[in-house]
Amino acid sequence: MSFEPLIISKWIYDTLSADSTLATLLAGSKAPNYQQGVYLEVAPEKDPISQQMPQLPYIVYSRLGSEGSDQTVLCGDRYYTIPLYRITVWDQKNGSISYQRVNNIINRVDELLGKQTVTVSGLTFLSQRYDTDQPFEIGSDGRVDYGLSLLYRFNTAI
Amino acid sequence: MPQPVLTSEVSVEISIADDSQATGGAGSVPATPTVNYECQAKSVKATITARTIDLTTLCSETEATFTTGLTGTLDLELYVDDTLGPIFAYKTGFLCKVKVIPGGAGSTLTYQGLITDSSLTYAPGDVEMESATIKLGAFGFTQVYV
């Protein structure tokens, strides 16, 4: 195994995008799965499914480095690594904001990703939520982009 | 110019007696180590200590330290394998041999002693680890290493 985070990243995407409950929560008033809705690193200019600009709410997840260095054993092999990931549900409002919609979505995300022991592509890892965050950005036109973030460590035996 | 020795591919073989030292008999002396744990071992630290007596006399101008024998400790840290499980659990009081084959400079040594401490570490989301301390030169052996 050479680059474990790519396998974990794919598992996050596959898990979130395969869940019908999450698809319904992300769709809002539109049909479930009308857009991809789950993006790595940054939302694209054009969603690959809808071919439109991504509509809020949506999920963006990204790597946050690793917790410490990889652990090694005397034979020289790596034994254990802990990649970190941030999963953020973004929404947008004018004026006062409400977390109700994003909270429902982030709760479902945590049910799917939190405290999971997974073996995939020959890799075994345990996901463990370790922190939360509430990012927001105020636009010049008064719109507020805001969200809820879950931060996970993926304790990975190599 | 002296060159540093990088620790890599250090082989660690361990054998533990079938019976405790207190039980005695042939089963209390471990066989020559053959099972390799190098890819579970996180670290090995061997400390050899000379036991001494002071033979200083009234006419001595310095302390006359005299060696009477060797003792010491071997400290091991191992990750617990999900198939084998911990190997030192319930083995305190057992004689043990640990063969260390350095990957770089140095000679192969087989340390011999009594397992006096073993511990297991469990932490949420972390990997299980075990550590053991072996007091070298126990009753049943004539040397701390061969």
Image (spheres, rainbow, N blue to C red):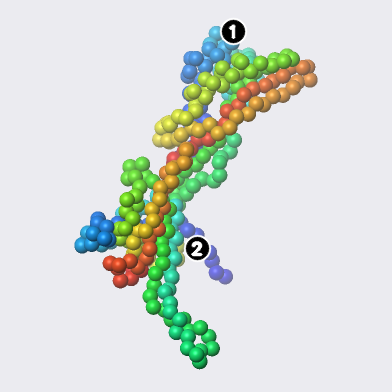
**Percent coordinates x, y for residue B30 in the rendering:** 27, 60
Q: What residue did someone put label 1 on?
A: A29
- The residue sitting at 67% across, 21% down in the picture is A146
Task: Tell me the chain of label 1.
Answer: A
Disc 1 marks a residue whose amino acid type is Ser
Between B120 and A123, the one nearer to me in the picture? B120
**x%, y% of residue B66?**
43, 81
Disc number placed over residue B5 in the picture, else none: 2
Of the residues shown, which amino acid type is indicated by label 2?
A: Val
| Residue B62 seen in render | yes
Residue lying at the far bottom in this picture: please name it: B59
In this rendering, position of residue B47 left or right of residue B62: left
Quadrant in the picture for the C terminus of chain B: bottom left
Q: Is residue B145 above or below residue A19?
A: below
Local secondary structure at mark 2 = loop
Q: Residues within 10 Å of mark 1 (few under 14, many from 20)?
A: few
C-alpha span from label 2 to label 1:
65 Å
